[in-house]
């Protein structure tokens, strides 16, 4: 990241953080949306799906409102670092990003443990987790891998992931079976209120 880009991101982040966490209304991101949250949300900063949302159409998504996050707004949320052993090279790596539960909270989604989150990747891979699971495993929306932003075409730009090494029931599994609940290239989340 060059100096100008760093200063711009820092300025946006410091100005955006208080409004994201405490806003009564949604904050409109300045950059392109990386993550769109739809479903049972209380705040929205975009309207219904349109003909220009071609990937969403191909994956048969339908919604009348959504909450979008760009890279700067995700960086404005306090980040957490984890160091799971990854299946791709069987080595520990540092992943950093905001807690998935905090991202969900900003959208005004229900906070009950039974709330379900359908996480969808750009390739159509989708998993459903309860908010209780998201909190228990401390899922993050990873924006960085080993100190660098994750590119599209790799595991990014966003990855819903947790530190599998910290949980005995997950650590007991072969490393290539620990991340089935973790869609990389995450771009959409549907909140389902079952309460």
Image (spheres, grey):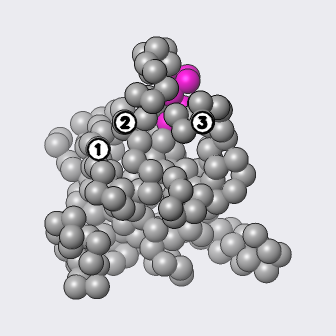
As drawn, is 66 to the left or to the right of 77? left
Closest to the camera, between mark 3 and mark 2, is: 3
As drawn, is 104 to the left or to the right of 16? left
Closest to the camera, between mark 1 and mark 2, is: 2
Q: Look at the picture and state if 175 lies above or below 98.
A: above
Closest to the camera, between mark 1 and mark 3, is: 3
Q: Position of residue 140 (x, y in %)?
A: 51, 45
The front one of 86 and 127 is 86
Q: Residue 20: tell me if it is visible.
A: no
Disc 1 is placed on an element classified as strand
Q: How many marks?
A: 3
Q: CA distance from mark 1 to mark 2?
A: 8 Å
Magenta stretch: give its range. 162-167
**Residue at the right extreme?**
3
Q: Look at the picture and state if 24 lies above or below 87.
A: below
Q: Which residue is mark 3?
A: 89
Q: Quadrant of the N terminus?
A: bottom right
The front one of 161 and 7 is 161
Q: Which residue is mark 1?
A: 127
Is there a contact, CB below 8 Å, between mark 1 and mark 2? yes
């Amino acid at each position: 990241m060059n100096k100008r880009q760093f200063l711009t991101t820092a300025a946006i982040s410091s100005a955006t953080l208080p409004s994201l966490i405490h806003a009564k209304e949604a904050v409109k991101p300045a950059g392109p949306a990386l993550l769109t949250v739809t479903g049972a949300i209380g705040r929205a900063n975009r309207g219904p799906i349109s003909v220009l949302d071609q990937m969403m159409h191909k994956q048969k998504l339908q919604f009348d409102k959504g909450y979008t996050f760009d890279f700067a707004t995700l960086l404005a949320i306090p980040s957490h670092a984890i160091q799971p052993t990854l299946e791709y090279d069987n080595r520990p790596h540092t992943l950093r990003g905001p807690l998935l539960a905090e991202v969900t909270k900003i959208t005004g989604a229900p906070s009950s443990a039974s709330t379900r989150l359908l996480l969808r990747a750009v390739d159509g891979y989708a998993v459903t987790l309860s908010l209780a699971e998201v909190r228990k495993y401390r899922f993050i929306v990873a924006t960085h891998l080993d100190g660098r932003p994750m590119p599209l075409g790799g595991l990014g730009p966003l990855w819903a992931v947790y530190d599998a090494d910290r949980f005995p029931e997950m650590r007991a599994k072969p490393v290539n079976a620990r991340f089935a609940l973790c869609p990389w290239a995450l771009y959409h989340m549907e909140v389902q209120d079952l309460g």
